[in-house]
Amino acid sequence: MVRKFFSVIEREISGVHNAAYLLGFFALLSQCLALVRDKLLAHQYGASITLDIYYSAFRIPDFIFATVASLVSISVLIPFLAKLFEKDDEGQKKAKDFINTVFTGYSLIMVAVSAIAFFLIPYLSNLIMPNLSPDMKAELILLSRILLLQPIALGFSNLLGSITQVTRRFFLYALSPLFYNMSIIAGIVFLAPTWGVKGIVWGVVAGSVLHFGIQIPYIAGLRLLPTFSFRAKWKDLVEVMKMSLPRTLTLSLFSLELIFITFYASTMPEGSISIFNFALNLQSVPFAIIGVSYSLAAFPTLSRLFSSGERKKFVEQVEVSARHIIFWALPVTALFIVLRAQIVRTILGSGSFNWDDTRLTAACLSLFVVSLVAQSIRLLFVRAYYAAGNTRKPLIINVIFSLVTISLPFLLILLWRSTPFFSNFMEILFKVEDIPGAIVLMLPLGFSIGSLGNMLVLWFSFRKDFEGALDKAVVTFFHALSTAVITGFVAYLSLGALTRFWDITTFFGIFFQGFVAGLMGILAGVGILSLLKNPELKEVLAIIPRKVFREKDVVLDEIAKID
């Protein structure tokens, strides 16, 4: 039974679309578990100082992961491994030496950085949440120190994940987040009643260990399991570090953005950090399913095409991926905006999470998803540039817009506090005028404006660097935009019509109201796309009936030529 299980999860997945839909499916499962996790946290603690401390405890460990663990980033290692795996048995031996070198260098650097951070956390915590009482500050320090174990484990998982991806074992790679979230849920259910939030944090650490543990049997079977080497080829490590430096700075900038946003939120009413993180996690569901899945699935193929000199196919693959991201993301954005209250109340609304928490989180969610397309396309372009060996340009663009994203919330907060007309307008627009703490809306607003600007600059930059790129994606954008408007409008009308059928003060009432309204909107959107003879809809309808794991990914001549 165990052998059969591993034979299934270790199956090779060929084709970008097969891989994208597989990763998307498992991303959906993982995000469902993440929503269960957030549901349990919201029910037990609500938007409270306890959860504020819990979320803030991740900021320093996450920053360390973004900086040091990017040394073993999948985006960085796959191009190196792809070249080695294309060779004969000698290439396999060189791949093992390369993996051992990276593992050795990563281990030494990570242990040293984590040890330094352990002693600096009491001082760094003051920069994140400066206004805590001594007892609460001690708890933040303890949780942050425990969570230093997470980036070590997740970095090791990244190293193993680069091997499973380059060998197209996407099924195996996709399982890791499931085990991670299940472990956190176990921590909430079984450890938190006795140990409090500390029990949840230990569940996080256990989940990060499981994240890489599920990949070990397959990697060991290939005889590629990393080992510490005293004969590491430091020249190879230097090459990896040169390649990873731009990505390191890019990822660390995002973590830095969250540190600043957490600081801003700590100056707001209690629970603001929790509200921001709940909304961020909810918008991460469509982002992970659409944006992350397509960029992950496309990256190995993009690396292979560019390294083999097939520039035209490389550009076509980027465009196909961008078209499908836009096709999915715009209608989803419309549905999330219209159904935001139903989504938040259904997923989080119970126990200590009250109606005011729901309304604020829903308003923040709508501001986040406005930039869903931008976040997804930006991730694709960054990976495309990495696959092309150009890490400098996305780095410069990301540095500029990270500074924008860090500065905008501060400026918007000043505007809110100094201009009653602006604050009243925003409160009325998002229907939160009678709720204290509505100023938290300035955080996702600043984040989304920065994301939109970042994507636009990357879009025009990519078109300039690769002439003729993305022309078809513009057509897809207008198809998807018209579909999104119709989808959102029909869903909005359906919400009002359905109030007479269900009691929307109950869980099932608000769930079915949102579900049916969303379904009506989707059917209307599909009808519009059919009238427009949208090519992405035809591709999706051609892919879905097929057996994803058994057939080659040849949907249309256009895709067949690429992959």
Image: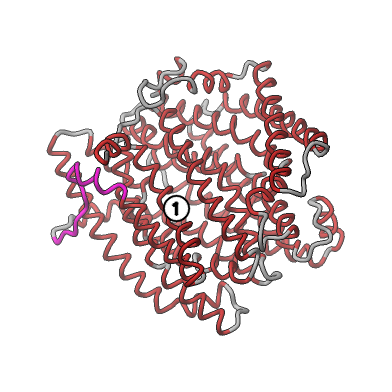
Helix, strand or loop for the magenta stretch, by majority: loop
Q: Which residues are magenta?
A: 214-230
* Residue closest to the eye, 12 or 470: 12
Disc 1 target residue: 182
Q: Position of residue 277 (x, y in %)?
A: 60, 58
* Residue closest to the eye, 550 or 294: 550
* Residue closest to the eye, 191 or 410: 191
Dividing the picture into quadrants, the one containing residue 348 is bottom right
Q: In the picture provided, is 413 more to the left or to the right than 251?
A: right
**Quick check: is 177 in the magenta stretch?**
no
Residue at the bottom extreme, as displayed: 134
Q: In the picture provided, is 27 more to the left or to the right than 163?
A: right
Dividing the picture into quadrants, the one containing residue 82 is top left
**Quick check: is 216 in the magenta stretch?**
yes
Q: Position of residue 244 (x, y in %)?
A: 36, 52
Q: Which residue lies at the image location 55% right of the left edge and 33% below the top edge?
A: 325
